[in-house]
Image (cartoon, rainbow, N blue to C red):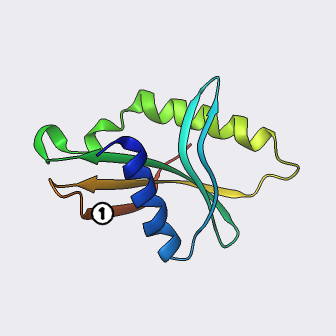
Amino acid sequence: MKGSDAEQIAAAHLQKQGLVLVAQNYRCRFGEIDLILNDQNTLVFVEVRMRSSEAFGGAAASITAAKQAKLLLAARHYLAELKQEPACRFDVVLITGKDHRRIEWIKNAFGE
């Protein structure tokens, strides 16, 4: 399974929870944001991580402080393009297991 497959699984999972997809694979000079969705009045930046096992900390351990800093910069770049800045949060969707069926959604996983 590729990263794009994991992002599709995550997007579908979040949309089933009522979120609305705004953008996928937003790229700028600071990095990439996997998914951007609306959760009612909140803009949600989502990092998707997939691992086949929990070894070495699993998917969550792969989101380092450096990765978080890049995501924050990319989000600021995205927000600068909007006329009005909405409420925002950073979520993480972890997909683990050999069959990639275990999905964990962490709201407000990190931020400024």
Residue 103 vertical position relative to residue 111 in the rendered view, above or below: below
Residue at position x 55%, y 34% from top? 32
Compared to 74, does 34 lie above or below?
below
What x and y, as percent, mark residue 91?
47, 55
Q: Nearer the viewer, residue 20 or 64?
A: 20
Q: Is residue 73 left or right of residue 85?
A: left
Instruction: Report the residue marked by disc 1.
Output: 103
The single residue placed furthest to the top in the displayed view is: 29
Q: Is residue 1 left or right of residue 55?
A: right
Q: Quadrant of residue 95?
A: bottom left
- x, y percent for residue 58: 20, 45
* Residue at the limit of the structure toward the left, as seen here: 55
In the rendered image, the quadrant that contains the C terminus is top right
What is the secondary structure assignment of the residue under circle 1? strand
| Mark 1 Cα shell of 10 Å, populated few (<14), some (14-19), many (≥20) | some
| Residue 39 x, y percent position in the rendering | 61, 69
Q: Hey, what amino acid is under mark 1?
A: Ile
Residue drawn at (58%, 55%) of the image: 89
Residue located at (81% from left, 40% from top): 81
**For this rendering, which residue is in front, 108 or 1?**
1
Q: Residue at x 17, y 47 (%)?
A: 52
